[in-house]
């Protein structure tokens, strides 16, 4: 009985105390809100393409529960921004996402404002290809008003979309001769062939590609110096039978802006996406395409940088790539299959599989190239360089094709795995040679056997093994070599390319790789 009386007494006191509390009375804010930042930068967006969602944290540092009378965009219903305040979308109709009333905020608590935008640059009266769009978030009014600036750079662009049948809602699929039997086949790749008017990409506006842009038979896609090409997810370029791709970048004096170089990357412009692999598909040089050339080009953040198929015995190489960089690729940097590739001053790094793979035979000649791989996943399946002469079909049947030549001269082949090159042959012709290269291969079980007899001068001559290349910052794709590099002075002038990838003349002792040591700066 005593316990029951004690419980009732305590309960009564608690009930009386709680009824006298003033917890649920909110006082108007007095202009003393605090903010996590004074400006919200939404980075760069393309016209008519929605931005990512950004946030602003708002603090009530006082000991009072407050109510913010209004939170609104200064441009009101005409603003191109839209907000969400702690999950609420504000007033309905035209002011939804623009205007909020009586927002409560407890003492020593905070709330989130989420903001995003979609802007049509043509509606802004912009005279240039880009426009700085601004607005303000206003908190309260009168003498208590506080504000936060919101800023977005909007870029105009040339958009290339696949066609869509409005009646069936089916998006166009590329149709071309996939298996080489002379009959067009329908692929599972959404996209369309470029028109004749679209076959020259200039540097006037960036290009944004949705789906695969096809280069038709007998057509040539030309990209001029300074062109910028952005790909949406699962997008890329396919060059079909008798078609060609010519990317004509030029040396850029400013290596920060690369204004003359051609850059191919994803369409997410926020800094968060600057180095994320696998954002788009690939550049696919299909069997039958010819005379493809790439110069002073950066290809980054793709699934496969370049796929080159077939034509290993063509009179001209399937692909000639010079003074170019490929990095942050989720699979292969370059994957050649029974094809022919010539490369000079090429840099490949940070690929989820091999940086350079010559598969099912072919013909490959690489001079002054840096084939590295410092992928941050310790479970990378393949080394930086892979060469083989076979494929295995779904029935586990092995098919072979001659590796007629694979020459690596004055190259660096290195990475954070060991060994960093793999040679696999099943057929009778497997010709390769490494000359004056810096190589990573330190495997006692393989060394001296099979394709790894490094004393055999038919296949290996004047190479240096396992010495640190002293890259400037391999994880950031800064691949210039330092003072202590094992690549310094080991090159052979017989294979010399006159200038390095930065346009510096190679004189005196020849360094291996795409960069001459003289270009390095601390």
Image (cartoon, helix red, strand yellow):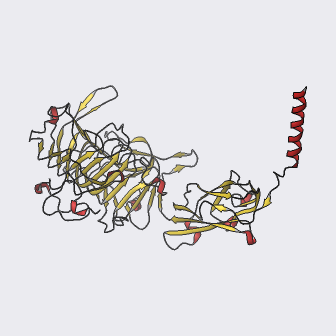
| Front in this rendered view, residue 46 or 401 | 46
Quadrant of image for the N terminus:
top right
Count of labels in the image: 0
| Front in this rendered view, residue 193 or 351 | 351
| The furthest residue to the front | 2
Find residue 468 and report its horizontal and vertical position in percent: 23, 48
| Front in this rendered view, residue 273 or 315 | 273
| The furthest residue to the bottom | 127
- Residue at position x 36%, y 39% in the image: 378
Q: Determine if residue 21 is in view.
A: yes
Residue 278 to residue 195: above or below: above
Find residue 431 and report its horizontal and vertical position in percent: 15, 40
Q: Quadrant of residue 65?
A: bottom right
- Residue at position x 9%, y 38% in the image: 456
- In this rendering, would 407 be left or right of 182? left
Find residue 368 and report its horizontal and vertical position in percent: 20, 54
Residue 79 to residue 388: above or below: below
Q: Quadrant of residue 60?
A: bottom right
Q: Quadrant of residue 67?
A: bottom right
- Residue at position x 71%, y 52% in the image: 88
Find residue 373 and report its horizontal and vertical position in percent: 31, 46
Residue 273 to residue 206: above or below: above
| Front in this rendered view, residue 161 or 418 | 418
- In this rendering, would 361 be left or right of 109? left
Residue 116 to residue 408: above or below: below
- Residue at position x 31%, y 26% in the image: 396
Quadrant of image for the C terminus:
bottom left
Q: Determine if residue 102 is in view.
A: no
- In this rendering, would 38 be left or right of 311? right
């Amino acid at each position: 009985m005593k316990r029951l009386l004690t419980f009732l007494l305590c309960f009564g006191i608690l009930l009386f105390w709680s009824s006298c509390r003033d917890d649920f009375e909110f006082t108007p804010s007095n202009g003393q809100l605090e903010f996590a930042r004074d400006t919200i930068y939404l980075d760069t967006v393309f016209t008519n393409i929605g931005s990512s969602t950004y946030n602003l944290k708002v603090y009530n540092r006082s000991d009072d529960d407050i109510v913010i009378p209004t939170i609104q965009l200064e441009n009101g219903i005409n603003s191109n921004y839209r907000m969400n305040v702690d999950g609420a979308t504000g007033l309905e109709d035209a002011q939804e996402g623009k205007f909020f009333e009586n927002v409560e905020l407890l003492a020593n608590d905070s709330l989130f404002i989420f903001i995003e935008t979609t802007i049509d640059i043509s509606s802004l009266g912009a005279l240039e290809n880009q426009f700085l769009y601004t607005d303000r978030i206003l908190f309260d009014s009168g003498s208590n008003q506080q504000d936060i600036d919101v800023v977005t750079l909007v870029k105009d662009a040339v958009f290339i979309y696949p066609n869509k049948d409005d009646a069936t809602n089916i998006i166009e699929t590329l149709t071309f001769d996939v298996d080489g039997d002379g009959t067009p086949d329908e692929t599972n790749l959404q996209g369309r062939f470029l028109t004749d008017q679209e076959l020259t990409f200039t540097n006037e506006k960036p290009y944004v590609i949705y789906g695969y842009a096809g280069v038709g038979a007998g057509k040539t896609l030309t990209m001029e110096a300074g062109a910028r090409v952005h790909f949406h997810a699962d997008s890329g370029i396919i060059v079909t039978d008798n078609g060609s791709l010519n990317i004509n970048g030029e040396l850029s004096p400013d290596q920060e802006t690369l204004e003359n170089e051609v850059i191919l990357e994803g369409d997410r412009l926020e800094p968060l996406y600057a180095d994320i692999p696998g954002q788009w598909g690939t550049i696919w040089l299909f069997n039958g395409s010819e005379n493809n050339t790439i110069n002073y080009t950066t290809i980054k953040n793709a699934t496969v940088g370049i796929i080159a198929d077939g034509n290993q015995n063509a009179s001209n190489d399937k692909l000639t790539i010079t003074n170019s960089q490929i990095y942050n690729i989720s699979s292969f940097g370059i994957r050649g299959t029974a094809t022919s590739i010539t490369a000079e001053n090429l840099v490949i790094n940070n690929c989820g599989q091999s940086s350079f793979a010559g598969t099912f035979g072919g013909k490959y000649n690489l001079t002054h190239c840096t084939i590295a791989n410092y992928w941050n996943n310790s479970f990378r399946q393949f080394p930086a360089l892979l060469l083989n002469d076979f494929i295995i079909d779904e029935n586990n049947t092995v098919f072979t094709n001659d590796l007629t030549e694979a020459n690596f001269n004055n190259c660096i082949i290195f990475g954070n795995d060991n060994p960093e090159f793999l040679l696999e042959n099943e057929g009778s012709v497997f010709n390769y040679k490494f000359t004056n290269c810096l190589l990573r291969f330190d495997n006692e079980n393989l060394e001296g056997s099979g394709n790894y007899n490094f004393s055999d001068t038919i296949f290996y001559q004047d190479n240096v093994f396992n010495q640190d290349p002293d890259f400037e910052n391999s994880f950031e794709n800064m691949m210039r070599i330092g003072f202590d590099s094992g690549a310094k002075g080991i090159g052979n002038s017989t294979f010399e390319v006159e200038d390095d990838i930065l346009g510096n003349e190679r004189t005196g002792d020849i360094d291996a790789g795409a960069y001459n040591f003289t270009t390095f700066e601390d």
